[in-house]
């Protein structure tokens, strides 16, 4: 199949590179180069992982407690682990080189001031692309770094450029690279979302603002459907889609919430988009219709799966994720109808990734669980507590890379061996 035909089926650039490398006889080095994984969808492509855990969890290889306070997740590329954390008055970006028994600090650099307002700590994960790191801090400062040395190549104050202001709990967007563009969502009077040249930081396009809406806490998703390249994300009160090539706003739908918090990214599959948030409207699935360069959206169903920030995963016709507050627990939802097929209430809400057919669920109360989704329910294949039972802010997403599971809780990063023996 040609590259153009592969792209038309929705295969991402990451998958294309992997396929090309394999065809050429080389094996791409395992990586987790961006938030929520190689394709930004919460799915790990590795196999050969433990089908179940022993009591107490998988083997702990090492930990480090020098990464500062925050909820960002690590990313891994080129043999280094990159992670952000607030230490004192500064937000730091750290680069560690992992080994069999520990991780050595390679370099560290700052990206502005730390966030000391409510829920203090670093928010956004870094994004790796072709030897460069991109990161936005809680006040909209974007930096591009040389990934090997940490040297700053350029910076942009997106608040100043696009007329944006701080939001209540700080910007939390994990930046998205799209070809030669870096996608940012300042939520300003001069742009809700914008594309910067990833090499220089100059503005390539800027969308119109969405009324007086500010940015929200979610990160955008990118996909192609109906001959249009879509970026879908959220403002403080709306879900919206823009044309990824020119920033034209294609559609928007109201999603008001009590605290103006929408943090879980949208989920796309086959022209349908799932959006969710707590303290407001039920979760919704929209059907996209594309014609004549225009896009319309229609609500298909609603769901009780009111995820806060832990993400929702699509797999084989089903959605997996956790609810919030009165819906505390884990859900399996039929993607076609929105019907809840089953739920698990004895594990608190949290973040999730999918690997080798199993769900890795890290609850906001610091408990890690390995769940197997079946036709009748979740089968628990392992469970252990990582931090104290009184914890309620274990919000960093798990990461899997090269048979290793990484968990972060504020200033500590743990690394576990989950390779099948």
Image: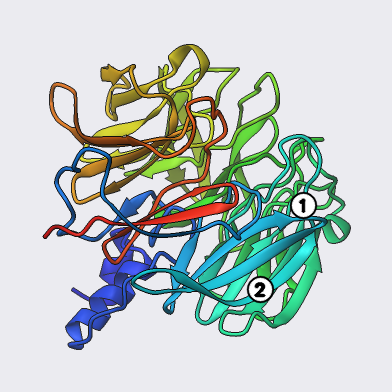
Q: Is label 1 in a helix, a strand or a loop? A: loop
**CA distance for labels 2 and 1:** 32 Å
Task: Estimate the x, y position of residue 141 in percent, counting from the top left.
Answer: 77, 61
Q: Which residue is mark 1?
A: 191
Vertical order, 5 against 87 (above or below): below
Instruction: Specify the label residue 408 is tagged with.
Output: none
Sort mark 2 into few (<14), some (14-19) or many (20+) by Cα contacts within 10 Å. Answer: some
| Foreground of the two, 212 or 107 | 107
Residue at left offset 69%, top offset 69%: 196
In the rendered image, the quadrant that contains the C terminus is bottom left
Task: Estimate the x, y position of residue 248 in percent, counting from the top left.
Answer: 64, 53
Name the mark nearer the viewer: 2 or 1. 2
Residue at left offset 26%, top offset 62%: 403
Q: Which residue is mark 2?
A: 108
Task: Estimate the x, y position of residue 266 in percent, counting from the top left.
Answer: 48, 40
| Foreground of the two, 105 or 124 | 105
Q: Tell me if 49 is positioned left or right of 223 in this view.
A: left
Can the viewer see residue 241? no
Residue at left offset 56%, top offset 59%: 244
Between disc 2 and disc 1, whose residue precedes? 2
Residue at left offset 53%, top offset 39%: 395
């Amino acid at each position: 199949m040609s590259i153009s035909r592969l792209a038309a089926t929705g295969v991402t650039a990451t998958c294309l590179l992997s396929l090309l490398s394999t065809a050429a006889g080389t094996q791409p080095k395992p990586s987790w180069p961006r938030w929520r994984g190689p394709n930004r969808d919460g799915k790990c492509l590795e196999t050969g992982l433990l089908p179940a855990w022993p009591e107490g969890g998988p083997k702990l290889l090492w930990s480090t407690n020098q990464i500062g306070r925050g909820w960002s997740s690590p990313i891994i590329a080129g043999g280094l682990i990159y992670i952000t954390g607030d230490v004192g008055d500064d937000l730091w970006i750290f680069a560690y080189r992992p080994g069999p028994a520990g991780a050595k600090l390679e370099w560290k650099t700052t990206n502005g001031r730390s966030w000391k307002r409510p829920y203090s700590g670093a928010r956004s994960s870094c994004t790796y692309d072709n030897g460069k790191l991109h990161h936005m801090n809680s006040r909209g400062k974007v930096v591009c770094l040389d990934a090997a040395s940490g040297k700053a190549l350029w910076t942009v104050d997106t608040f100043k450029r696009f007329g944006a202001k701080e939001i209540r709990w700080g910007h939390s967007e994990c930046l998205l690279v799209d070809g030669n563009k870096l996608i940012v969502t300042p939520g300003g009077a001069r742009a809700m979302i914008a594309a910067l040249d990833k090499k220089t930081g100059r503005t390539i396009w800027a969308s119109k603002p969405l009324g007086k809406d500010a940015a929200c806490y979610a990160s955008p998703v990118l996909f192609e459907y109906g001959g249009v390249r879509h970026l879908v994300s959220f403002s403080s009160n709306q879900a919206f889609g823009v044309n990824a090539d020119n920033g034209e706003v294609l559609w928007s739908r109201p999603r008001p919430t009590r605290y103006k918090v929408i943090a879980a990214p949208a989920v796309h599959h086959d022209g349908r988009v799932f959006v969710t948030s707590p303290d407001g409207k039920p979760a919704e699935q929209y059907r996209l219709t594309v014609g004549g360069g225009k896009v319309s959206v229609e609500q298909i169903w609603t769901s009780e799966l009111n995820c806060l920030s832990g993400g929702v995963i699509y797999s084989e016709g089903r959605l997996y994720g956790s609810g919030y507050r009165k819906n505390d627990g884990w859900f399996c939802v039929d993607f076609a109808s929105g019907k809840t097929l089953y739920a698990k209430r004895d594990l608190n809400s949290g973040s999730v990734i999918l690997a080798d057919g199993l769900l890795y669920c890290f609850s906001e109360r610091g408990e890690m669980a390995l769940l197997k989704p079946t036709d009748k329910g979740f089968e628990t294949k392992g469970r252990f507590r990582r931090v104290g039972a009184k914890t309620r802010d274990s919000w960093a997403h798990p990461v899997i890379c090269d048979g290793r599971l990484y968990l972060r809780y504020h200033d500590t990063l743990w690394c576990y061996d989950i390779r099948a023996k």
